[in-house]
Image: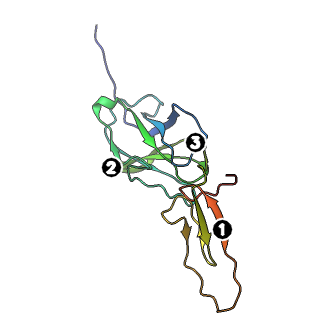
Amino acid sequence: SYKLKVAAPAQSFRPELIGAQPPYVAGDPFQVRVTALDDLSNIAADYADTIQFQSLDAGAPEGNDGATFPADYKFTAADNGVHDFTARLRMTGTRSLRVQQSSPFNPAIAGSTGNISVLPGPADRILLTLPNQAQAPGTASGRSGTVAVSTAGASFVATLRVTDQFFNTVLTS
C-alpha cells in the first residue's frame, strides 16, 4: 500500500479564539489558534511562511510588540499548519484580529476573527483631558492632541474621567 500526500499552498488563515471566550477584560491574555488553509479550506500542513497579527479597528493602539500582539511568527514543519498564540487587547469595545502573511508579503493570504468583546478593567487612575485633547485608550498617556493655548482669565472645559490601567473609561467603581 502506498500513501500519497499532496501539499497545496496556503490561500487563507482561520484565526479562532480557543479556551476562555469573550468578553475579555482589557489587557487580559487570551488564546488564538491560527490555521493555514488551502483553496479547499483544508489545513495547509506544509505552510512555512511568516504571519503577522493586526487590528483594523479604528484607533487601535496594539502592535506586534510581543506583549499585546504576538511578534511576527514563521511557521515550522512541526506546526503542521496550525499554531496557538497569546494576544491581549488594550482598548475596549467590539474588536477583531486580522492575520496576514508578512514574509513573503502577501496581504491576500489573510483571515480575521469574528467580533471580540473587550470590557474595561477595574478603576485604576484618573484621566484629565484639556481643550484640543481627546481620550486615546490603550496608549501610553491615554490622550492625544496638544493642549490649546487659552487666554488668561478665559474659561475652558476640562474633562475628568475614571479609567482602568489602559485609560478606558470605567462607568462604575
Residue bearing mark 3: 24
Choose top left, top right, bottom left or bottom right for residue 81.
top left
Q: Tell me how the rendering is colored.
A: rainbow
Measured in 3D between alpha carbons, the distance from the residue under mark 1 to the one under mark 3, in whole angstroms, is 25 Å
- The quarter of the rendered structure image containing the N terminus is top left
Point out the frontmost of discs 1 and 3. Answer: 1
Tag 3's secondary structure? strand
Q: Which mark is residue 160?
A: 1
What residue appears at the point 69 percent right and 54 percent down from the top-left corner?
171
Q: Residue furthest bottom?
A: 152
Closer to us: 161 or 94: 161
Q: Amino acid at mark 1?
A: Leu
Q: Amino acid at mark 2?
A: Pro
Q: Residue 123's spot in the image, x, y percent?
A: 61, 54
Residue 104, numbered label: 2
Q: Give the spatial CA distance, label 1 vs label 2.
A: 47 Å
Dot 2 and dot 3 residues touching (CB under 8 Å) = no
Residue 163 screen position, x and y as percent = 61, 58
Task: Specify which label sits upstream in the sequence, 1 or 2.
Answer: 2
Of the residues under marks 2 and 3, which one precedes in the sequence?
A: 3
Judge left or right: residue 75 versus residue 84: left
Q: Is residue 18 above or below residue 54?
A: above
Tell me what residue is drawn at x 28 percent, y 31 percent.
77
Q: Closest to the observer: 30 or 150?
A: 150
Give the image location of residue 147, x and y in percent.
Answer: 57, 80
Mark 1 or mark 2, whichever is nearer to me:
1
The tag earlier along the polypeptide, 1 or 3, is 3
Asked if labels 3 and 1 touch by Cβ distance under 8 angstroms, the answer is no
Q: Residues within 10 Å of mark 3 (few under 14, many from 20)?
A: some
Count of marks, rendered view: 3
